[in-house]
């Protein structure tokens, strides 16, 4: 008998010890963090000088938040992502407890009429940001277990989903924070859809969500005013329409290439909260349409790489976890951009990686670390 020569394997799969994170995704994250620090430093100079007699007050705090976030990202990208499946219930329970603590006087702190922070001495953080990540982990674990039953049975799949969202909605609206609740709903529906549920179940839940949104708008006059301003940008320019008016002035003043970094005028107490949810308007004024386009392209590329990781994830849990994280960051980014551009009502939602907010950037980077860990086990197409 002739000996059949052994063919060399053409597989490009690397041993687990040699797998690397998605370097292109990581590059995009660093570019957005750099842009964020640059713009927070520029946008907050006047506000910091007036409130704290330190023009770099917000920049230094944001730099600290980014530093903590990068450490968290380094840790979470080194932890096998399946670890979070075991932690899904205790993590979700801890996030619920934090949301309850926000409402307790002496523990939760109030600003601008909203109780959204827990203050521990000089340190404060926003529990709703923790809940975003906890919700993604919990739903990814829930829908990746007993998949067939939860895809087809309304009671097994949709009813627990509604109960979970109802609990979160109650706690978030006690703060109140309708914008954050909207982001959580989109996160939850993204994971629910990616799990392969029946379209009829999804349609019922979307219908219930729209009814809930209508109820929230009707229950608070300021939300109705925001909707009115969206439909008529010239409505009440010195009241409910003031922020939109100033944002559009900033974007229009920038032209194609902007007035120059640091030379914007709207951040000098014309534009409310220029370093948080209005920061995209400052980018438009100082860096023009070109700078805005770069930010949009970075988020689009982030979404492309993130969903590519989800598609190539080794298992159902990894796929749903990736979808949740990418949907969170991408949808929140475009809600902020669309709102500041007058394409949807204002929500008060910050721009991920760009806007000022230590808790937001730290928790988001920790979640990105999980996404990077999933990318290690994906068969990435080069």
Image (tube, helix red, strand yellow):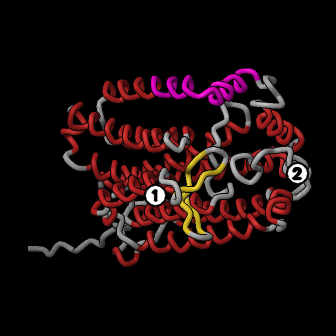
Observer-nearest of 183 and 108: 108
- Quadrant assignment, res 16: bottom left
- Quadrant assignment, res 133: bottom left
- Position of 207 with respect to 220 (left or right) is left
Alpha-carbon span between mark 1 and mark 2: 47 Å
- Position of 373 with respect to 152 (left or right) is right
Residue 251: assigned label: none
Q: Nearer the viewer, mark 1 or mark 2?
A: 2
| Secondary structure beneath label 1 | loop
| Farthest front residue in view | 105
Q: Position of residue 152 (x, y in %)?
A: 22, 33
Q: Residue under circle 2?
A: 268
How many marks do you count on the picture?
Answer: 2
- Position of 60 with respect to 113 (left or right) is right
Q: Position of residue 65 (x, y in %)?
A: 62, 68
| Secondary structure beneath label 2 | loop
- Quadrant assignment, res 34: bottom right
Specify whether residue 225 is painted magenta: yes
Q: Residue at x 25, y 37 (%)?
A: 157
| Farthest bottom residue in view | 17
User: How crowded is the residue under tag 2: few (<14 C-alpha within 10 Å), some, or many (20+)?
Assistant: some
Q: Does the image show residue 276?
A: yes
Relative to 71, residue 180 above or below: above
Q: Position of residue 196 (x, y in %)?
A: 31, 38
State the predominant SS element of the stretch in magenta: helix
Q: Residue under circle 1?
A: 381
Observer-nearest of 69 and 260: 69
Q: Residue at x 79, y 58 (%)?
A: 44
Magenta residues span 211-232
Q: Residue at x 63, y 44 (%)?
A: 113
Specify whether residue 371 is painted magenta: no
């Amino acid at each position: 008998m002739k000996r059949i020569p052994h063919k060399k394997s053409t597989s490009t799969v690397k041993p687990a010890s040699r797998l690397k994170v998605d370097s292109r995704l990581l590059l995009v994250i660093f570019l957005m963090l750099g842009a964020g620090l640059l713009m927070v430093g520029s946008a907050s100079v006047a506000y910091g000088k007036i409130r704290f007699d330190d023009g770099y007050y917000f920049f230094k705090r944001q730099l600290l938040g980014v530093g903590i976030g990068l450490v968290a990202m380094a840790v979470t990208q080194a932890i096998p992502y399946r670890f979070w499946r075991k932690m899904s219930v205790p993590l979700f329970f801890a996030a619920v407890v934090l949301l309850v603590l926000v409402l307790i006087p002496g523990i939760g702190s109030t600003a601008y009429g909203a109780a959204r922070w827990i203050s521990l001495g000089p340190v404060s953080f926003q529990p709703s940001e923790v809940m975003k990540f906890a919700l993604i982990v919990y739903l990814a674990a829930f829908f990746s277990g007993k998949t067939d039953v939860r895809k087809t049975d309304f009671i097994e799949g949709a009813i627990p989903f509604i109960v979970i969202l109802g609990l979160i909605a109650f706690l978030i609206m006690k703060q109140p924070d309708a914008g954050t609740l909207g982001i959580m709903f989109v996160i939850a529906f993204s994971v629910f859809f990616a799990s392969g549920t029946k379209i009829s179940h999804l349609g019922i839940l979307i219908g219930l969500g729209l009814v809930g949104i209508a109820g929230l708008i009707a229950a608070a006059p300021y939300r109705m005013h925001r909707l009115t301003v969206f439909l008529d940008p010239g409505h009440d320019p010195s009241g409910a329409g003031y922020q939109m008016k100033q944002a559009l002035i900033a974007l229009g003043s920038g032209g194609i290439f902007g007035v120059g970094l640091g030379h914007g005028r709207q951040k000098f107490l014309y534009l409310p909260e220029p370093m948080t949810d209005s920061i995209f308007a400052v980018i438009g004024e100082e860096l023009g349409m070109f700078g805005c386009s770069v930010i949009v392209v970075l988020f689009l590329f982030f979404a492309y790489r993130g969903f590519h990781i989800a598609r190539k994830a080794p298992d159902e849990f990894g796929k749903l976890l990736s979808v949740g994280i990418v949907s969170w960051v991408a949808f929140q980014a475009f809600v902020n951009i669309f709102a500041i551009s007058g394409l949807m009502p204002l929500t008060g939602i910050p721009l991920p990686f760009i806007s000022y907010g230590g808790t937001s950037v730290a928790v988001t980077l920790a979640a990105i670390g999980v996404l990077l860990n999933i990318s290690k086990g994906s068969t990435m197409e080069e």
